[in-house]
Amino acid sequence: MQWQKNQDTHIVRWLRRRTLVFNAKQAIGSRIWAKSFILDSDGNVHDIYEDGKLSCSTFISGILRMNNLWDDQTVANTSSLIQKLPQNGWELIDEPRIGCLIIYEDNKLHRAWATKHIGILVDDDLVVSNSSNDEPYVIRSHPINYMKMAHGDWRKIEGYWWHKDFEDDDLFHMKEDVFTRTETPVHKFEKNT
């Protein structure tokens, strides 16, 4: 993308992909997405995320929303999240790229129904999402190929999703210190004359 030089203002670009990957890595160890409570018609309270076992879509939609990569409300299941990806600027790609969302096949875990899994690729072979296998159920990293299934293979990857506003690889790998530090807000500011 070409940027026009302007005499009166200095325009900067928010590196959404780099910010998302950084924030996902910083979430490792967190339990902030582990619980959400509902009240049923009989007056019983339930934790719909089962102490974090089922919190991947809430973690992903929440962190996407925090980084302005998701316009909808956070969602409680991966099928709903996948359905809403296109209307939130996400598109399927053929190969994984750092920052993409990865969708994994259905797995029953311990329930009668199967659920998909979703994570963020934060390095060439490292995904960040919730952990459904190891207590405590926190946000963890795992290899891109993980969780041996009953059929003996790794949990199948069903798709990679990429956001239309992500920067290219050259900007993603640019060193942080190439920019001049300033206390001025980073969106747009007037030059001093």
Image (tube, rainbow, N blue to C red):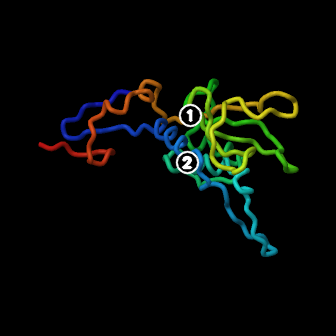
Q: Where residue 149 appears, x then y in whole percent?
A: 83, 34
Asked whether, in this view, residue 23 is left or right of residue 135, the answer is left
At label 1, the amino acid type is Val
Looking at the rendered structure, which numbered label has been put on residue 61? none
Q: Secondary structure at mark 2?
A: helix
Residue displayed at 60% across by 38% down: 120
Residue position marked by numbered label 1 in the rendering: 122
**Which quadrant, please, contains the N terminus?**
top left
Q: Where residue 151 appears, x then y in whole percent?
A: 87, 30
- Earlier-in-chain disc, 1 versus 2: 2
26 or 158, nearer to the observer: 26
76 or 50, nearer to the observer: 50
Q: Where residue 85 appears, x then y in whole percent?
A: 62, 42
Residue displayed at 75% across by 42% down: 116
Q: Residue furthest bottom?
A: 43
Residue position marked by numbered label 2 in the rendering: 63
Position of 148 relative to 79 (above/below): above
